[in-house]
Image (cartoon, helix red, strand yellow):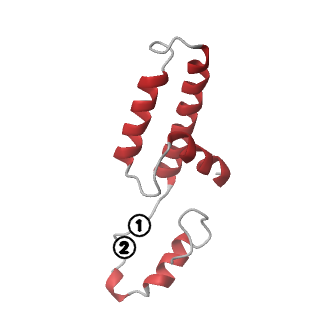
Amino acid sequence: MEYDKLREAIKVLGIKDKASIKEIKEIYKDLMAKYHPDKCKQEECYEKSQIIAEAYKIIMDYCENYKIDFTSIDLKDVDKQRWWYERFGDDPIWGKPR
């Protein structure tokens, strides 16, 4: 996945740094209610609704395909920084713990 597309999708939907899937879905539904061509008869609403739908798809694809197995390890006996970097280190969104 191109992370620039993901960042742009986050910007299009106006998602905060930390948002739950539920919050993302609510933001999407609110924006689609506002810009859906059946409700908004202005010409730019059709294009805007397409952009919103594509942004939502990009974000949800990223979330659904990000696989993390937390059940197979006992975190209390693990070097947390090393564990984090091994799983997220190369990911520009979640990598490099602070």
Secondary structure beneath disc 2? loop
Q: Residue at x 35, y 81 (%)?
A: 75
Residue 65 can be seen, yes or no? yes
Q: Position of residue 27 (x, y in %)?
A: 41, 38
Residue found at x 58% / y 26%: 48
Above or below — where is 16 with respect to 95? Answer: above
Circle 1 SS class:
loop
Question: Closest to the observer: 22 or 44?
Answer: 44
Label 1: which residue? 69
The answer to the question of whether label 2 and label 1 lie on touching residues, with beta carbons closer than 8 A, is yes
Residue type pointed to by label 2: Ser
The answer to whether 84 is drawn above or below residue 53 in the figure is: below
The quarter holding residue 44 reads top right
In this orientation, does residue 2 appear?
Answer: no
Residue 55: x and y, percent?
56, 38
Q: Which residue is mark 2?
A: 72
Please name the residue shown 36% across and 77% down the image: 73
Q: Where in the figure is residue 52, as x and y percent of width and height?
A: 54, 32
Kind of residue at badge 1: Asp
